[in-house]
Amino acid sequence: MIFRQIVHDDLGCASYLVGDEHASVAAVVDPRFEIARYLELARYTGVDIEHVLETHNHADHVSGHGRLAAATGATIHIHRDAGAQYDHEPFDDDWELELGDVRLRAVHTPGHRPEHTAFAVIDTARGAEPWAVLTGDTLFVGDVARPDLAVDKEEGAHGMFHSLHDSLLALPPETEVWPGHLGGSLCGGHDIHNLPDDMDPERRVAAICMSGQRSAVAASQLQRLGAKRVLHVVDGGVGTWERLGYPVERD
Ligand SMILES: [Fe+2]
């Protein structure tokens, strides 16, 4: 079988090409916007990308599913609860995608988002049980995803607990974990444990970004690390700031 992790260092994201070289078929899971690497890998391994799978609707990066579907004719799949407006085939928990001898099985894992789904990877040439699971934004290495971005934080945390304990930990103990994020992601998996040395926790600090989303993460992170006077600039972020005539310094 073919199993490749593609790391996007700039955003701390990981995507995957999974397939069967004998059946010449593959799927891409959580593609990034730039799709050249997937097309190159598919050419190199001699497979056609026939499917694109999303673990969830991403708020931290623009998905390349549309570009990939346009370039390859692949079908896009995402859990029904995503309510996706683009062309796709919705799936439910336990749905299976057959790629030659390889199967990707949907493991619905709500918490980070209601539609979030992990994909258990089964190589039937090797055995009937999954040997790996693409955990998307549910489980990272040494961390779990934020449950407070898409839904009420208690509802999200409740979902996350059950997704981890009832679904992911129910997989065979030797199952390898391949996450959707590495260090540095906004969805979780950060590696900042203290305020910067030169930052006074009593000093006023404002978190602002273009959409308000990253600054929400930054503001809550700063507060958690002990900053006492954090202001989250909402209502349009940098765009509104500029429209109101306040100065912006650019690199
Ligand atoms: Fe996410």
Image (tube, rainbow, N blue to C red):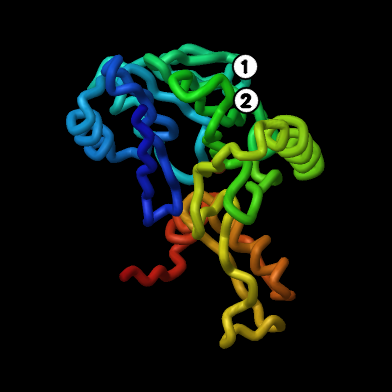
Residue nearest the viewer, comparing 207 with 35: 35
Indicate the quadrant containing the C terminus: top left, top right, bottom left or bottom right: bottom left
Question: Residue 127 location in percent, x, y?
Answer: 52, 22
Which disc is residue 107 wearing? 2
Residue 165 higher or lower than 23, as above or below = below
Please state which amino acid type lies under the numbered disc 1.
Answer: Asp
Q: Does the residue tagged 1 have its C-beta within 8 Å of any atom of ligand 1?
A: no
Residue that carries the numbered disc 1 in the rendered image: 94
Rendering quarter of residue 207: bottom right
Ligand 1 is located in which of the four quadrants?
Answer: top right
Residue drawn at the location 57% of the way across and 60% of the way down:
190
Please state which amino acid type lies under the numbered disc 2.
Answer: Val
Residue drawn at the location 67% of the way across and 61% of the way down:
220
Rate crowding at label 1 as few (under 14), some (14 to 19) or many (20 or more) other CA atoms within 10 Å.
some
Residue 223 higher or lower than 150, as above or below = below
Q: Is there CB contact under 8 Å for labels 1 and 2?
A: yes
